[in-house]
Image: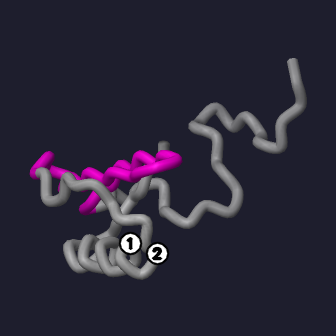
Amino acid sequence: MPATDVQDTGDLPQQKDTIMEPSATPEIIIGLDVGKTGHHACALTNTGERIYDKPLPQDEAAWREIFASMQAHGSVLMVVD
């Protein structure tokens, strides 16, 4: 068996240096598809309501503005593809 830096306690493994508490459930989940020529984001609430589903501009300031508006709804989890 390969060595890991997580000890088996019989429970789920504990990750080091996480930024979320294991019991935390984000209010907003953002899926971000990053491409060479274009990007797209879709944001859902934790109840499944779609609150954002649009192409993203190639502009960091615009991205920050969009993500800040998502944070106004609560904690955010972002998944990047």
Residue 16 falls within the magenta-colored stretch: no
* Residue 3, image x, y percentages: 89, 31
Judging depth in this view, the residue of 28 and 13 nearest the camera is 28
* Residue at figure coordinates x 48%, y 42% from the top left: 81
Judging depth in this view, the residue of 1 and 34 nearest the camera is 34
Q: Which mark is residue 63?
A: 1
Is residue 29 in view?
A: no
Query: Given the image, on which type of amino acid does mark 2 rest?
Result: Glu
* Residue at figure coordinates x 14%, y 59% from the top left: 51
* Residue 16, image x, y percentages: 70, 57
- Quarter of the rendering containing residue 58: bottom left
- Quarter holding the N terminus? top right
The residue range painted magenta reads 27-49
Left or right for 13, reference 45: right
Does the residue at mark 2 contact the one at mark 1 (Cβ under 8 Å)?
yes
Query: Given the image, on which type of amino acid does mark 1 rest?
Result: Trp
From what the image shows, is residue 67 above or below residue 50? below
Q: Residues within 10 Å of mark 2 (few under 14, many from 20)?
A: few
* Residue at figure coordinates x 33%, y 51% from the top left: 40
Judging depth in this view, the residue of 59 and 26 nearest the camera is 59
Q: Which residue is mark 2?
A: 60
Is residue 8 in view?
A: yes
